[in-house]
Amino acid sequence: MNAKKMIVLPLAVMALVSCETNSSVGSYEMKWVTPTSTPALAFFDQGDNANWVSSSVPRNVVIPAFGTATYDAIVFDGVSGLNVIKSNGYDWKLADWISGGNFYVVSTKHTAKTDFAAGQTVTGFIKTGNAARTFLKLSKDKWNWDYEDSDLTFLGGVADVQAAMLSNADSSDYWIVADPIYTAVKGALAAKGVALNQISDLQADFKDAYDVETIPAAALFVRGATYESHKDAVDSFLSETQSRVDVSIDDPDKVIEALHAYGNDDKVFSRFGFTPSMVTTMQGDDANKFAMLKRGVITDDKAFANGFASVILGSTFDDSYFLS
């Protein structure tokens, strides 16, 4: 088993994640890239850090980063990232999990799985991502949906799904979405008098079907060469990131304060993929609708990945793909 490495910060650091953190130790500054939306919540106080690139189109920006030495860390869909590394022999290791799944199938035109009929369309994001893989597995094997490949459209990221839904939510019969986009779109459509129906909570349906606790989502990968040369910087970066994740669950007011300090709603949304008010709605009252994974919840990174991968891919990942 690949036991998860626990890095404990001093209580003073745990109590307050400073907005001045620059993810560097000594002279080495970590550079990293993430999608916007949920993964960006782990960097809520890093908006002004030029070493961080966030992208609303991860297919075009984040995935290609695995094949370069541009960055020291990447946050991406964990199982998909492991597949990219395994398939190409890239020098990256999964170091930590950021979030679990918060994926849904929704519709403005239908109200239940049993409404599906041949010829109806589905629009999602990143065909190789865990949300799409989960939908494809469940819809074929458990829901008995009979569709053609031409009935499916997969966009470059969840932000593209948001834009398409806000433009014309009736243009697809079903949509695969992730929070916080799901919550934002549902609210925007409700303001127009349009109901957005939840067809599937993919996490719950997956658990019921395959007895797997949840769908793994965002994970943090580190470049092997960076870890070998700058271990202290990497360890500090991982610890700081996990501390921010914990704060996002335990004290979302600090997240909101940092986001307001960064700029107005438009600037925050462009950088992070959500606004302070969305954090209030989703993280308030211990809701944790971003599905962030608190320190210690995942005790074995490999087991968490393989529980899902064994069902979806029919294969698993060995120790060499994980930071020991």
Image (cartoon, rainbow, N blue to C red):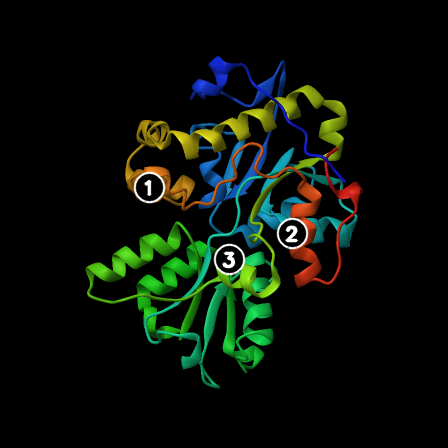
Looking at numbered disc 3 in the image, what kind of residue is underneath it? Answer: Gln
| Residue density around tag 3, few if under 14, some if 14–19, many if 20 or more, within 10 Å | many
| First reached walking from the N terminus: tag 3 or tag 1 | 3
Q: Residues within 10 Å of mark 2 (few under 14, many from 20)?
A: many
Task: Report which residue position mark 1 lands on.
Answer: 275
- Between discs 2 and 3, the one toward the N terminus: 2
Percent across and percent down for residue 190 are 23, 61
How far is disc 1 from disc 2 in space, using C-alphas?
A: 27 Å
Residue displayed at 60% across by 42% down: 219
Vertical relation: 246 (above or below) 322:
above
Name the residue type under label 2.
Val
Q: Nearer the viewer, mark 3 or mark 1?
A: 3
At mark 1, the secondary structure is loop
Q: Return the x and y of residue 263 as percentages of the image width and height.
A: 31, 32
Q: Which mark is residue 79?
A: 2
The residue located at (70%, 53%) in the rendering is: 83
Query: Which of label 1 and label 2 is nearer to you?
Result: 2
- Residue furthest toward the bottom? 118
Q: Quadrant of the N terminus?
A: top right
- Mark 3 → mark 1, Cα distance in angstroms: 24 Å
- Secondary structure type for disc 3: helix
- Callout 1, which amino acid? Thr
Please tell me whether residue 50 is drawn above or below residue 140 in the rendered image: above
Closer-to-camera residue (76/242): 242
Which mark identifies residue 203? 3
Image coords of residue 84 (percent x, y): 70, 52
